[in-house]
């Protein structure tokens, strides 16, 4: 009896809560029986009011909102919401809108703080790099070799530089002990490299790690606060890979001469750079913009950062050639808030980009508990063994495809769905195929886990639900409006012409216009041929245009014109006694084989833009009227008064 009372009390409480929620968000209107809650209307009303130059009154907005909902209803009845194209587009928008809810913001905040610390410091490093291996066994061997090299340096006193020259495959640094100079978090290096460098104490060597370029160990030589950024420009002369002492001496003489010109003041730095620099900065007067030390090679940064603002360096050599640099300005690292947008772009552009999402996914897994169905995987393995491995026979087998390989809440993942997402490959053995397929099953379960959370957020978060619904209805309204109004107006030539005739008095010009065709030719001789052809073949209008294009191909172009005096130099010359324009390019020669002055538009094509817009408005009005006649609309005036 006690249990029954508790159960009754719980049910009563749920009923009270449900009643309170309904009372706080009552139904404002019904459109063909479909309910629209007050919260949805208020969301759209306030959002649109903020965007209007002249906000609508509440009653005006109610009319607009009802029309909007009627169009969405029409789209649903037309089946647009069931099409594959709509489902794909809407799913993409919904996933994008859900991203803030599917990431652990604290993880991203930590990454931002760490990135800022790395931007505020520079680390002098050297590294040893080995080639990437084609498989996991090769990776283990490379890691073991790097571990051995690291141990030789740390425990046996071997020279890092000697081992670097012997083993490293980085030809750019292996002969100088793997030295990479000073780096910071803004240099553009792979993040795993940066993280290893900043995580390793001075004088120590990191454990092996992987980047997209190879396997590495990093030795940290020195740390120092960031020197900020400079704005600079340079004059650059390139040294070829193989050059003689005589060639270098000539280059030094040239650079000394340019330096003397700058010192004399007879030419500006910008002028000298534009005329003499041998890289892409020449067109901008040698401007390099703002950069941190680690964003340039050390031998360049060291010179520029040692200059004072406005000072010009003497010619100096780097691995690329000879430079003369001028430092224009300097600024410090900047505050966290100043650098945040830049740091966020960097994080979202490298391997850190999905860390916040992965952290959130792990949290959601503990909530929704995705599970691989072992019985189904066992049956799959039996089918693979019987077939001698994985191929199209297994992936197309209806019995195998229907097996439920995983579950997340009420969502199921069948093997058929998994097979459809797997790339086609050569036949592989049963054990390897089972591992491969299970990996794809787990990826599908991850997607389903995120979908479960999206469903939950949509059910419990009014802001997200309203935003998703706005995008959904917006796509439907656009598609149905395009079908019934915009596309129809542009394609219904007969309807457009009838509309023009019935409303001819609405279209007039303040002055006469020339209406006709202009034929352009690539040469005077071609133009003469066109005139002779038309004299022998008296075709008119569009038939003439088609005939000339067919006959003369790319040697002519034909344009239909409707222009008043002053609107076209060509028409001014043909119809209004203007001087012949000096046409540029291919089409210098022209004449008009037919044309006349008209005081008012004769057909819809003469005022296509205005007529098309008016016809669209007419179609819209007629369509909305038909929707109003077809569907019943009920607005609760009492609830409408509750709109805030």
Image (cartoon, grey):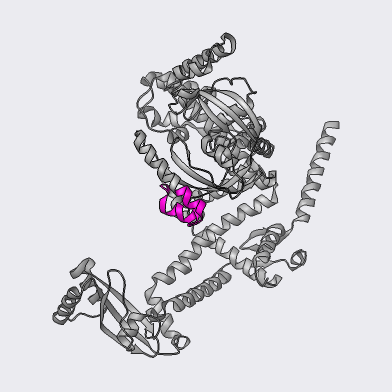
Name the residue at 26% across, 79% down.
Answer: 541
Task: Pinpoint residue 483: horizontal percent, then vertical percent.
Answer: 46, 64
The reply, left or right, for residue 567 in relation to residue 2 is left
The C terminus lies in quadrant: bottom right
What secondary structure characterizes most of the magenta part? helix
Q: Residue furthest left?
A: 536
Is 197 rendered above or below residue 279?
A: above
Name the residue at 48% across, 69% down.
Answer: 485
Is 139 rendered above or below residue 70?
A: above
Between 312 and 38, the one lying in front of the other is 312
In magenta segment, residue 370: no
Res 209 → quadrant: top right
Between 307 and 114, the one lying in front of the other is 307
In magenta segment, residue 266: yes
Between 327 and 429, the one lying in front of the other is 327
Is 74 rendered above or below residue 581?
A: above
Q: Residue furthest top?
A: 156
Residue 270 in sight: yes
Between 644 and 52, the one lying in front of the other is 52
Name the residue at 19% across, 69% down.
Answer: 552
Res 397 → quadrant: top left
Task: Pinpoint residue 592: horizontal percent, then vertical percent.
Answer: 26, 82
Task: Pinpoint residue 588: horizontal percent, then vertical percent.
Answer: 27, 74
The N terminus lies in quadrant: top right
The reply, left or right, for residue 430 in relation to residue 329 is left
Specify start and end residues of the magenta stretch as a single range. Answer: 258-279
Residue 82 in sight: no
Task: Pinpoint residue 497: horizontal percent, then vertical percent.
Answer: 39, 79
């Amino acid at each position: 009896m006690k249990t029954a009372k508790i159960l009754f009390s719980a049910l009563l409480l749920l009923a009270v809560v449900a009643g309170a929620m309904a009372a706080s968000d009552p139904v404002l209107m019904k459109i063909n029986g479909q309910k629209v809650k007050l919260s949805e209307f208020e969301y759209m009303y306030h959002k649109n009011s903020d965007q209007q130059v002249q906000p609508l009154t509440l009653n005006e907005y109610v009319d607009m909102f009802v029309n909007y909902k009627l169009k969405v209803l029409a789209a649903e009845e037309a089946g647009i919401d069931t099409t594959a194209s709509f489902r794909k587009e809407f799913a993409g928008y919904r996933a994008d809108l859900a991203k803030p809810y599917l990431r652990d913001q604290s993880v991203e905040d930590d990454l931002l703080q760490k990135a800022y610390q790395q931007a505020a410091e520079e680390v002098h490093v050297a590294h040893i790099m080995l080639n990437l291996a084609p498989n996991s066994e090769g990776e283990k061997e490379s890691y073991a070799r790097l571990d051995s090299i690291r141990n030789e340096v740390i425990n046996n006193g071997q020279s890092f530089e000697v081992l670097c020259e012997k083993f490293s495959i980085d030809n750019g640094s292996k002969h100088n002990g793997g030295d990479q100079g000073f780096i910071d978090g803004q240099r553009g290096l792979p993040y795993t490299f940066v993280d290893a460098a900043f995580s390793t104490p001075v004088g120590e060597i990191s454990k092996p790690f992987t980047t997209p370029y190879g396997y590495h160990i990093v030795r940290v030589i020195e740390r120092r606060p960031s020197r900020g950024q400079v704005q600079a420009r340079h004059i650059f002369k390139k040294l070829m890979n193989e050059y003689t002492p005589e060639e270098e001496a000539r280059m030094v003489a040239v650079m000394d001469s340019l330096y003397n010109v700058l010192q004399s003041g007879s030419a500006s730095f910008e002028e000298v750079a534009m005329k003499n620099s041998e890289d892409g900065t020449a067109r901008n007067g040698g401007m390099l913009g703002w950069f941190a030390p680690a964003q340039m090679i050390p031998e360049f940064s060291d010179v520029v950062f040692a200059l004072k603002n406005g000072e010009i360096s003497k010619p100096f050599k780097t691995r690329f050639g000879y430079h003369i640099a001028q430092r224009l300005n300097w600024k410090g690292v900047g505050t966290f808030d100043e650098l945040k947008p830049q740091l966020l772009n960097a994080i979202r552009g490298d391997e850190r980009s999905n860390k916040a999402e992965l952290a959130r996914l792990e949290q959601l897994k503990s909530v929704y508990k995705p599970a691989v169905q072992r019985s189904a995987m066992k049956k799959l393995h039996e089918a693979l063994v019987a077939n001698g491995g994985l191929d199209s026979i297994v992936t197309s087998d209806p019995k195998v495809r229907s097996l439920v390989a995983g579950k997340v809440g009420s969502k199921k993942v069948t093997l058929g769905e998994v097979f459809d997402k797997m790339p086609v490959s050569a036949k592989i053995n049963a054990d390897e195929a089972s591992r491969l397929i299970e990996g794809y099953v787990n990826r599908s379960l991850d997607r389903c886990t995120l979908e479960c959370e999206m469903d939950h957020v949509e059910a419990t978060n009014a802001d997200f639900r309203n935003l998703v619904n706005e995008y959904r209805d917006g796509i439907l309204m656009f598609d149905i409006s395009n079908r019934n109004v915009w596309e129809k107006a542009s394609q219904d030539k007969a309807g457009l012409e009838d509309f023009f005739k019935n409303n001819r008095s609405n279209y007039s010009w303040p002055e006469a216009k020339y209406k006709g065709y202009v034929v352009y030719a690539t040469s005077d001789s071609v133009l003469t041929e066109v005139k002779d052809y038309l004299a022998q073949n008296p075709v008119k209008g569009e038939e003439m245009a088609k005939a000339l294009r067919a006959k003369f191909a790319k040697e002519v172009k034909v344009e239909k014109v409707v222009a008043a005096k002053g609107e076209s130099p060509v028409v001014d010359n043909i119809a209004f006694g203007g001087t012949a324009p000096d046409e540029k390019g291919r089409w210098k020669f022209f004449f008009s084989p037919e044309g006349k002055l008209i005081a008012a538009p004769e057909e819809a094509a003469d005022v296509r833009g205005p007529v098309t817009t008016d016809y669209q408005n007419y179609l819209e009005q007629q369509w909305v009227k038909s929707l109003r006649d077809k569907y019943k609309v009920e607005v609760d005036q009492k609830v409408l008064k509750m709109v805030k």
